Image: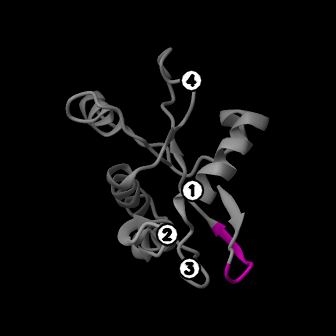
């Protein structure tokens, strides 16, 4: 999802969701990203030639969270693009236009076991996704 960076005003691309090309009934919405899936997406992006975007996903300090976490960053000034405002914008975009409102960056073949682990966690506790 492209958004205006809060710090420099340039357009920053943020990885906000994963969606299967053949969704199950339970996959009505894209999966929002969490730290594990963001790391997975970073690797997929790098291997697919989106090196600059992949490099903008890295650990950053968040004063709001009070810790470092793997986050989206502006490709121009490296400012952290916080999860809360990014997720709010992504949710609004989804409400207005559905999955089609998002750009597809990468289409990758992923085994069902990997998808289930990243989406649903090791014990099915749920999780968020991306891309």
Q: Are marks 1 and 2 in contact (CB under 8 Å)?
A: yes
Q: Earlier in the sequence, mark 1 or mark 4?
A: 4
Q: Earlier in the sequence, mark 1 or mark 2?
A: 2
Q: Are marks 4 and 2 in contact (CB under 8 Å)?
A: no
Left or right, residue 74 beside residue 10: left
Which residue was labeled with disc 3? Answer: 79
Which residue was labeled with disc 1? Answer: 84
Q: Quadrant of residue 14?
A: bottom right
Eyeballing the image, is 22 above or below 76?
Answer: above
Which residue was labeled with disc 4? Answer: 28
Eyeballing the image, is 43 above or below 53?
Answer: above
User: Magenta part of the protein: which range?
Assistant: 7-12
| Residues at marks 3 and 1, CA–CA distance in whole angstroms | 14 Å
Numbered disc in front, either 1 or 2: 2
| SS for callout 3 | loop
- Residue projecting furthest to the left: 122
- Using a 10 Å C-alpha cutoff, classify the residue at mark 4 as few (fewer than 14 neighbours), some (14 to 19) or many (20 or more): few
| Residues at marks 1 and 2, CA–CA distance in whole angstroms | 10 Å
| SS for callout 1 | helix
Q: Position of residue 59 (x, y in %)?
A: 37, 72
Left or right, residue 2 beside residue 115: right
The quadrant in which the N terminus is found is bottom right
């Amino acid at each position: 999802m492209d958004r205006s960076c809060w710090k420099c005003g340039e357009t920053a691309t943020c990885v906000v969701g994963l969606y299967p090309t053949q969704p199950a009934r339970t996959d009505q919405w894209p999966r929002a990203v969490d730290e594990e899936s963001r790391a997975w997406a970073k690797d997929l992006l790098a291997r697919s030639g989106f090196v600059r975007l992949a490099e903008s996903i890295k650990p950053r300090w968040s004063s709001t969270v009070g810790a470092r976490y793997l986050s989206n960053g502006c490709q121009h000034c490296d400012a952290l693009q916080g999860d809360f405002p990014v997720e709010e914008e992504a949710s609004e975009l989804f409400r207005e236009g559905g999955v089609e409102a998002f750009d597809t960056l990468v289409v990758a073949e992923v085994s069902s076991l990997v998808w289930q682990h990243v989406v649903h966690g090791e014990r099915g506790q749920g999780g968020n996704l991306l891309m």
